[in-house]
Image: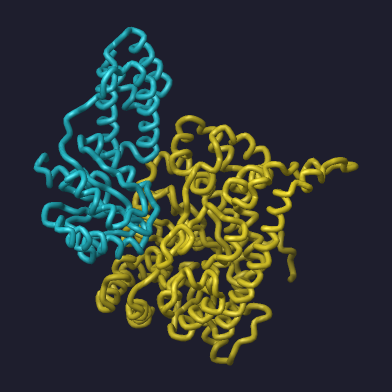
Amino acid sequence: MAKEWAELSPQEKREQRFQRWLSPPGVTFASPEAEKAYKERVTRFIKAFTLQKPDRVPCILPSLGLYPAYYAGTNLATVMYDFDEMKRAWRKVLHEFDADTFVPPVLVPPGPALEAVDYKLYKWPGHGLSPSTLSYQCVEGEYMKPDEYDALIRDPSDFWLRTYMPRVFGAFKAFTALPAWTSFEEIVIGNFLPFANPEVQAGLNAMMKAGAESLKWAAAVGEVSAEALAMGFPGVMSALAKAPFDTLGDTLRGTQGIMMDMFQRPQKVHEAMERIASIAINNALASVAGAVAPIVMMPLHKGADTFMSVKQYETFYWPTFKKVIMAFVNEGITPVLFAEGSYNKRLDIIGDLPKGTVAWYFDQTDMAEAKKKIGDRCCIMGNVPTSLMMTGTPQQVKEHCRKLIEVCGKGGGYVLAGGASVDAGNPENMRAMMEAAREYGKY
Amino acid sequence: MSGDFVNLLADLKEDEVIKLTKKRLDAKEDPLKILEDSRKGMEIVGKRFAGGEYFLPELVFSGELLKQITEMVKPYLKGEATQKRLGKVVIGTVAGDIHDIGLNIVDFMLDVNGFEVTNLGVDVSAEKFVKAVQDTKAPIVGLSGFLTPAFDAMKDTIEALDKAGLRKNIKVMIGGGQMDDEVRKYAKADAYGKDAMAAVSLAKQWIGAS
């Protein structure tokens, strides 16, 4: 490296990261053909993300979340606990779909680890939901009280450890008795005493057990992931990050809580979001550092059209969200901004980002409008309706894709993708989508 | 005082409307009148929501204000306050789905528009819907769902209503997250509503009140 990393411009950083994605260190491809196909696939995505014309429109099938469990004839309840079954299901998808990308089972949470710590924030099949349910679901609640903003703002990590975690993990209930880590200063006298508490010890043991269980899971995921890379299928996300408003609204205060706070303590909401922004940035940068694809996926929730007004979006949602986006852009990382629900009323705001540095992934937004309003600055992705993927015919899917490509594909900067992800349904619909990208997506 | 009160509530002026509630109670005003004014205020909130002026935060906050006012008024009430309702609606989030934000907006909007709502909550089995329709004799059922597993749960629920011999007497609407007209056809519902306002106009239309 001629220049130190810190001296590089965002553009130079982006190029270096893309180079690393194209030639990932430590990956041995199964064959020269696999390597060639890998480079072609990655190039296709890089060009779309940077608003150029690839050889054809790249495609991300909406089957990459939990669908493989269904496809392989098993279910989420099984693969969350039986990692051999998990590997079998994901491999089956890997080998039977000639797609542009592959997502290893990173979105399958390890059941034994969650059980070890008695995780209460989520319900999953067989654990609060019927065993046949195909997804896990968040149990929204007020995990942070309205009078706890100051504690969060003062020291988020401390708040997390001693207030938030005891509420969402049954096994960590006694962590309220822990000392603040910052109390370990100078000669330590009595600081370790809380660790003699049997309930604290049980909590720490549970945490270690969750670690051991996660390690087994990670080995299984790593195996599938390495196989996919060797076969020439790149991943398209290396980390997840959230908009600060969503962290506060989904995770801490709950929908009800945050919306009250917008009226009753707006200043605290802003201060808290500033604190959360830098945490979100650092966490995602750390994840990307060890990964191959320089992409951060940001699933967006409470800023959708129906959740708040344009003015509220501009006041509460966008400023700290943009701050997080820009931190990634300045580090040469491409954020994929997944706007769940619809974002039709946000299109005049969200294009205000450096040209060719982000991809907006839409669920139910009007794609023609999106192309018109932000397509010259941002790559757009989406949005074959989930309902069509799950209940339509392959012909209907293919036709829908053709129209999308016709409208959004013009001039490059488009990735054909689903709306939300699909957990079940006719695999031929997935293949029809791939076929549409190949047949109608050529530039 | 009453006109101010309605507007203060509709404009979400927390301090002012609470102060005025206290003042009215101290002046020994009829508590039922205060509740009636609250209803009028909430009706305006509902209208502003329908008109795109208010969003979810305003609904949530107005609900909180109403709760505060009702709590204050309660000790002064002698009997139950009853009001004439347009008709009954049973709503709930279908089995396997635990999302309720949209469900509660629909509840709110149907309520402020004069419907008597039985909200069954989340993860509601087909049997529970059947029982609620039998118990309430509601002519309208609203199925809510956010995630894709809801497609089948909606279909199953409507089939169960059919098997129980109730289907022909009721109208079923669906809505939420990934629902759309495709899902409506798949689940054999009567209508898909894209938002809470659609739920209100469908309910009014079906009950012959629009």
Can you say which quadrant of the picture contains the C terminus of chain A?
A: bottom left
Q: Position of residue A159 (x, y in %)?
A: 65, 42
Is residue A337 visible to the viewer in this orientation of the structure?
Answer: no
Tell me if I can see residue A423 in this picture: yes
Quadrant showing the N terminus of chain A: bottom right
**Location of residue B137 by image quarter:** top left
Depth check: A271 or B73 in front? Answer: B73
Q: Where is residue B168 in the image (x, y as percent from the top left)?
A: 11, 56
| Outermost residue to the right | A187
Q: In this view, does A44 lie above or below B189?
A: below
- Foreground of the two, A188 or A200: A200
Residue at position x 63%, y 42% in the image: A163
Q: Where is residue A121 in the image (x, y as percent from the top left)?
A: 52, 52
Q: Where residue A98 sits: x, y (%)?
A: 44, 84
Q: Nearer the viewer, residue B119 or B193?
A: B119
B1 left or right, relative to A218: left
Q: Residue at x 43, y 83 (%)?
A: A97
Q: In this view, does A40 lie above or below A174?
A: below
Colour seen for chain A: yellow
**In this orientation, which residue lies closer to the viewer: A313 or B6?**
B6
Q: In this view, does A307 lie above or below B98?
A: above
Q: What is the total number of numbered labels drawn onto the structure image?
A: 0
Residue at the far left in the pictured view: B208
Chain identifier, colour cyan: B
Quadrant of residue B154 in the image?
A: bottom left
Coloration of the structure image: by chain
A144 horizontally vs B76: left or right: right
Name the residue rendered at 38%, 14% in the picture: B22
